[in-house]
Structures are given as structure tokens and as C-alpha cells.
Amino acid sequence: MKKIGITCYPTVGGSGIIATELGMLMAKQGHQIHFITSSLPFRLNGVHPNIYYHEVEMNHYPVFQYPPFDLALANKMAEVIDQEKLDILHVHYAMPHAICAILAKDIAKHDVKIVTTLHGTDITVLGYDQSLKKMIQHGIEKSDAVTAVSESLVQQTRDMLGITRGINVIYNFVNEEQYERRELPEIKREYGIEPGEKVLIHISNFRKVKRVQDVIYSFQKVQEKIKSKLLLVGDGPEYSQAYQLVVDLGLTDKVLFLGKQKNVRDLLSISDLKLLMSEKESFGLVLLEAMSCKVPCIGTDVGGIPEVIRHNETGYIIELGNIEQAATYAVKLLSDQKLLEKFSRNSWKHAREHFYSQDIVQQYTKLYEQILPGN
Ligand code: GMT
């Protein structure tokens, strides 16, 4: 049994989901898990005797223009390392979590090993920022082990930050029990989806990098040829622009803005095809969620997306911004029921064979064992 601390962003997002699911699976295997976060991770919904939650509390003093949250986090980490005698502190995101962990290790009396998982935004966005670059490099160099969620992210980390140390690729996974397709004709009816109508879906946090507009333009072309609807799930900075575009294109009766949704599985269960047309994406967890629910995907030739979608087998890879190409592939797939069913089966199989949760958890535990004393 190992004692493992986990720090992640506890709010919605793929990295928070992975960190929490990993903690829950490890707790089931008998490890003791200590979440150290600013609020309860949103996926941490069940109770388990091996799971503990340590909240980082902040006092607000008028002398500080900005409350020093990162320092409070490092302080809390140090406290938990000593009190609980943690073996491993696994942090998700180099910035700021790896830095906080290094500081905490320095402060704590008990020896702990730091594992940092890179999820993408810390490298592909923050890595450009000169005011943070050295800090991110330091976090990566000083961790006892570093993992990244795709080969592409490893390469980008090397290219952008000049990192030469070993980085292990450990792919993302989904909770298979949760992401299992169900037959839900009543939900289709409730959303006004007519029998025979195809459903396309896009799920994201509507950040600029997700290029939701490309999804809408592609759908515009698809619906000219195939009776279909588009579900847009999520919310974020580009939401209003996306909404306005749908109005301008006269597609309001065919595009459903569903906002943030907790039960993504049921929405995927009524979908035929998923579109992810991002300009940056280290992995694209939503693709795996879709594939696990037997939904084929079309994604851009960007970051880790081609490591998740098998072109011409589980979906299609298109050039970034190539709306025409996306629409052509979507029409090809949606107009051929046999092909669609084949891609749907392939997607499920690919998800189970290459991203199976138990295999991924084992890769993490093996890594922990490698860096712990006595190995
Ligand atoms: O994509 C986002 O905006 C959220 C971000 C996160 O922190 O969850 O996602 C990153 O980590 C996910 C989990 O590893 C990956 O699936 C996403 O591809 C990655 N996002 C980017 O690289 C833009």
C-alpha cells in the first residue's frame, strides 16, 4: 500500500477528471489517496475509506494585492507530506503544481517523491510565456518522474522548453463503467431529434483553441446533405460568438446549445459523430469518452489527436481549419449506415484495447515503484 497525494485543478476539465479517476481507481486497489486541492474535485462523488481530502484554505490580508494561493498550496502539501508520511506526491500540471510540490518537498521533513503529469496547456500555452518559462522548466527538471498524455506533448515539451530528461507517455483513460453507450430514444425525442435524423456533437470549454466556429461551419455543410442536428455541449469565452454565428447562418433550429452538462454519457449515447477541430490539443479526452460510447470522431491533425483517432478506422483526421474536408468525411460516414456501424464498433474496441483504465493505472503504479527507495 502506498500513500499518494494528488493535486489537480478541481474544477471541470480533462486533467481534473484524469487525476480524480486515477485516485479513485488507486484507492480501490488498496492505496491511500490524499487529494490536496482548493475545493473538492468535481468528479469525487463517491465515498471510499481510502480517500482523504485536504482543502487549501486562504486567508485574505489587505496587504497582499494578490492572495498567494500557490504558497498556501505548497504549505498544505508540506503539512500533508509530514502528517501522512506520503510516499508520492502526484501533481497534474507543471505550472504551478510541480513548483508548489518542489517547494513543499523542501519544507517537509519526510522524504517524498514528486510525479508531474503534463496535460498540455502548461506547455503549449504557458510555455510561450517568458515570465513563466524558467519556472515550468524547473518544475519538470526537479520532479522525480514526469509523464505526458501523448507522444506529441513530449515532443512539444522538448522543442519549446529544451527539456532533455526522460518523460513517460501515459495516455489518458475513461471510467469504462460510466462511459458505456445506452439506448435512449426518449432523450432523442425530448431534444426534438426526429427518427432517421443524424446527431453530431461537440463538447468543449469553448476556448478559442477549440475553434467551435469550424465545427459550426462544417455542420452547415453537412446538414445541406444529411438530415441532422448538432449538439454543442459546454460553455466558455467563445460561447456568444458561436451562438451569433449559428443565428447568422440561420441554423438555430438545427443547432442545440446545451451549456455545461454533467451527464455527457447520455448525450454521447444519442450521437452518431463527434467533431473536435482544435488548433491545440495534447490528447482530447472527449474523443476517448466518445469512442467509449461507440461514437466515431473527426479531429484535426493537431497535437495528440492523431494518437487517439485511427484515420479511416475509428474516424477521420483532417487538416486544421479544413471545413470542406470535415464535411466531406462526415457526409461519407453518416450516409453509409454499415460504415457508420463499423466505425462505431472499431471506436469502442480501440478505446478498450489501447486506453483501458486498468492498464493505464498499472503504468502509473509501475512508475511510482520505479522511483521509490529500494527499487
Ligand atoms: O483542453 C482544455 O482546455 C482543458 C485541459 C485540462 O486541463 O483539462 O485539457 C488538457 O488536458 C486534457 C487531459 O489530459 C487533454 O485531454 C486536453 O487535450 C488538454 N488540452 C489541451 O491541450 C488544449
Image (cartoon, helix red, strand yellow):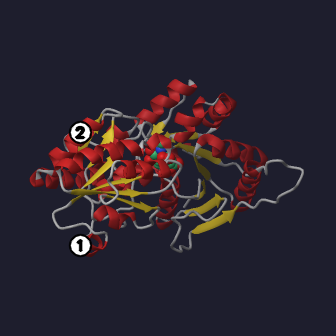
Could you tell me if the residues under marks 1 and 2 are in contact, i.e. CB atoms within 8 Å?
Answer: no
Q: Report the label total.
A: 2
Q: Amino acid at mark 2?
A: His
Secondary structure of residue under mark 1: helix
The label number, if any, that marks residue 268 in the structure image? none
Q: Position of residue 190 (x, y in %)?
A: 30, 73
Residue 192 position in % (x across, y down): 28, 69
- Going by the image, does 16 lie left or right of 274? right
- Residue at 41% x, 40% y: name it: 278
Q: Quadrant of residue 99?
A: top right
Q: Residue at x 15, y 63 (%)?
A: 196
In the rendered image, residue 80, in percent from the top left (x then y), is placed at: 71, 59
Question: Can residue 363 be seen by looking at this rendering?
Answer: no
Q: Which mark is residue 185?
A: 1
Along the viewing direction, whichever of 98 and 39 lies nearer the viewer: 39
The N terminus lies in quadrant:
bottom right
**Among the two numbered marks 1 and 2 on one chain, the one whose residue lies closer to the N terminus:** 1
Location of residue 352 by image quarter = bottom left
Q: CA distance from mark 1 to mark 2?
A: 29 Å
Location of the C terminus by quadrant is top right
